[in-house]
Image (cartoon, helix red, strand yellow):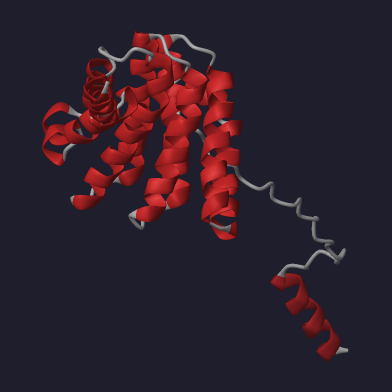
Amino acid sequence: MAARKSAARTDAETRRDQPTDSQRVTRAVREAITVGEIVSVGVVNLVRNTLVTALAGARDVGAELGTAATAAVRGSIRAAAEIGGDLGMVAKQAVKGTVQAGQEVGGDLGDIARSTTRGAVKTADEVGGNVARVARRAVEGVVEAGRDVGADVGNLARNAVEGAIEAADRIGTAAGRAVRATLSTTITGASALMRGMPVAPQRRAQPARRPRSRRASAPEQPASKRVTRRRGARSS
């Protein structure tokens, strides 16, 4: 009896020490996202391939995808910060890779959009980056990836914006205002982004100028006539 209890206790401890699917996938993603791989492979391909490979052995892909995708985006931004890279562009490319991977493995793209943009904004603040710029680029990445895979771009954009704002509000009031102001232009230009066209900056309408009133004046006489009149006046 005591031997059975000891064996059961050992099995329980062994299972507790073994990493869960979520921990295994997250660790695999973190180890794969390095500066060297980003430079040699490219952010989009690296993130997409890493997620697809890491999730291949997961029992519940849908449950693990959001966590793994967020880890990939956060790792990419941290790697870019180490070498002084453009955090906004790296966030955009990383988010695109997560959406493409989600489409390939059959995950919920809306959840991916929300979790990855939230993670991107949070990481940008942690490494001292421009939170508003990273938020905008991340949302643009979601929109472009959604267009590429034929998903509902409007739904993805809304989820992405909500995730970015949630993270910004947790950072502070100033960050929340800055991200909202930046993303307002992103939402307005979503249709242009879907067509692959650059978003034109909004310009304020200039007030109409009132025409200046001109005073009526008598036409100026030629100099010859003025001289003739002066001579006539002297002779008289």
Task: Quadrant for residue 5, please give it.
Answer: top left
Q: Quadrant of the N terminus?
A: top left
Task: Quadrant for residue 31, please give it.
Answer: top left
Task: Quadrant for residue 72, please give it.
Answer: top left
Residue 112 picture location, percent across and down: 45, 25
The image shows residue 86, relative to residue 32, as above or below, that is below
- In percent of the image, x 33 and y 40: which residue is there? 74
- In percent of the image, x 58 and y 20: which residue is there? 155
Residue 105 picture location, percent across and down: 35, 10
- In percent of the image, x 32 and y 45: which residue is there? 87
Residue 3 picture location, percent across and down: 21, 23
Describe residue 236's horizontal placement relative to residue 76 as left or right.
right
The image shows residue 104, relative to residue 112, as above or below, that is above
Q: Quadrant of the C terminus?
A: bottom right
| Total number of numbered discs in the rendering | 0
For the residue pair 196 and 226, the one nearer the viewer reads as 196
Q: Is residue 87 visible?
A: yes
Residue 76 picture location, percent across and down: 27, 38
For the residue pair 119 and 19, the one nearer the viewer reads as 19
Describe residue 186's horizontal placement relative to residue 60 as left or right.
right
For the residue pair 195 and 88, the one nearer the viewer reads as 88
Q: Is residue 129 visible?
A: no
Describe residue 18's horizontal placement relative to residue 208 as left or right.
left
Looking at the image, the residue that sits furthest to the front is: 1
The image shows residue 4, relative to residue 115, as above or below, that is above
The image shows residue 27, relative to residue 109, as above or below, that is below
For the residue pair 92 and 115, the one nearer the viewer reads as 115
